[in-house]
Amino acid sequence: MHVLGHLTIEEFLRDYWQKKPVLIRQAIPGFEPLLAADELAGLSLEDDIESRLIIEEGKTGPWEVKKGPFTETDYRALPEKKWTLLVQAVDQWVPEAAELLEHFRFIPSWRIDDLMISYATDGGSVGPHWDQYDVFLLQAEGQREWRVGQMCSEKSSILEGPSVKILADFAETDRWVLEPGDMLYLPPGLAHWGISQGECMTYSVGFRAPSSAELLERTVDAILPGFTQDDRYCDSALPIQASPGEITDDAASRLKAILIEALDNPALLKSTLGQLMTEAKYDDIAPTFEQGDESWQKSWKETCAALSEVDCWIRHPHARFAYSQQGDDSAFYCQGETSALTSTAVPLLSLLCDQPQWTSAELLDLCQDTQSQHLLTNLLFCDLILPS
């Protein structure tokens, strides 16, 4: 399904991605909600599912926020209008929601975070705000008016009092009313404000965007074990300084050279991204990727037997896969862990990471070497791949 309407993928990436908003009318013609409002509310009753209620005129003040899990009593106490239910990561619980995310793989799949669904009563809103990540807003049911405004940053003024970040100033530039099947793309930092017109549901496809500080911290953590006490600051070409107390530009340049040399390692940088971006959203309930040793690993014979009993396989809904190549080496990333392989495993890795499901015949055909067999065995017996 092509969800960019009149735009090609190339046009969208060139002109809009992380640059400016775009409204796509009937991105998914005839779209119908994947679940009813009461089913969405039912998810919010579960302990393991992240949910919030935002009440514009709450008992504790404007934009009151309550965190789930909720009870039926909580819902009976809500006002008639101007409240919103937000349920996070619905794709991890509803297979049809996971299938919907497949239509957004024109963005690298390791960047996709989750599908959040919001239900709002008449006038329901989470207020004028901005996000630090890209988002596609697909209207699923009813109508929602979207207003967009200025670009924001951490310096933008926020209202004091509400526990959600509501912009103190909103400079509207455009507004649209979205019908079911319409979709609005918003780049990071753009102020926006959605207001329900009657009851409505909106699906939000969000993307992972770790901060530069987190990326740098993870990268440094990966680099440090490679240094020894013999790796030192040095200045063998030291010139005479008029002021011996001054730290000069030359000294700063030497430090810069040390950092650049340490970072000039594409395989390490790919590994840093791979581990960070495949960490489970909720690691306390997600399966773990245990690579194990020969004494733990199930035999390849047992793996083949399991594959012979099932025709089709899918990723566990809480699992995240990615891979990289570097020369004759490759790496598979899953749940924040790395499995080092050779380039002969790339066809299998590409299949696992690029496709939503795989046949047993495809998997067997691409597991002709011991490394690939061990990887597939670990994935299968850690329940990271499941019968479809």
Image (cartoon, rainbow, N blue to C red):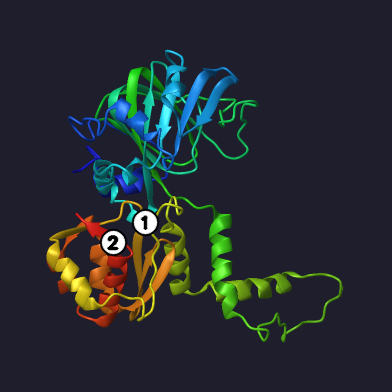
Of label 1 and label 2, which has the lower sequence position?
Answer: 1
Depth check, front residue: 67 or 255: 67
Say which residue label 1 marks: 110
Q: Position of residue 309 (x, y in %)?
A: 13, 64
For badge 2, the amino acid type reads: Cys
Residue 292: give x, y in percent of width and height: 39, 75
Task: Give the quadrant of the N terminus.
Answer: top left
Q: In the rendered image, which quarter is residue 245 located in?
A: bottom right
Please, what is the three-letter code of the amino acid marked with disc 1?
A: Trp
Q: Is residue 124 visible?
A: no
Q: Residue at x 26, y 82 (%)?
A: 370
Q: Quadrant of residue 91?
A: top left
Toward which corner of the image does residue 223 lie, by quadrant? bottom right
Cα separation, mark 1 vs mark 2, equals 9 Å
Q: Are marks 1 and 2 in contact (CB under 8 Å)?
A: yes
Q: How packed is label 1: few (under 14 Cα within 10 Å), some, or many (20 or more)?
A: many
Res. 6 in view: yes
Q: Residue 326: x percent and y percent?
A: 37, 76
Residue underneath mark 2: 353
Which of 159 and 46 lies nearest the eye of the viewer?
Answer: 46
Secondary structure state at the residue bearing disc 2: helix
Classify mark 1: helix, strand or loop. Answer: helix
Circle count: 2
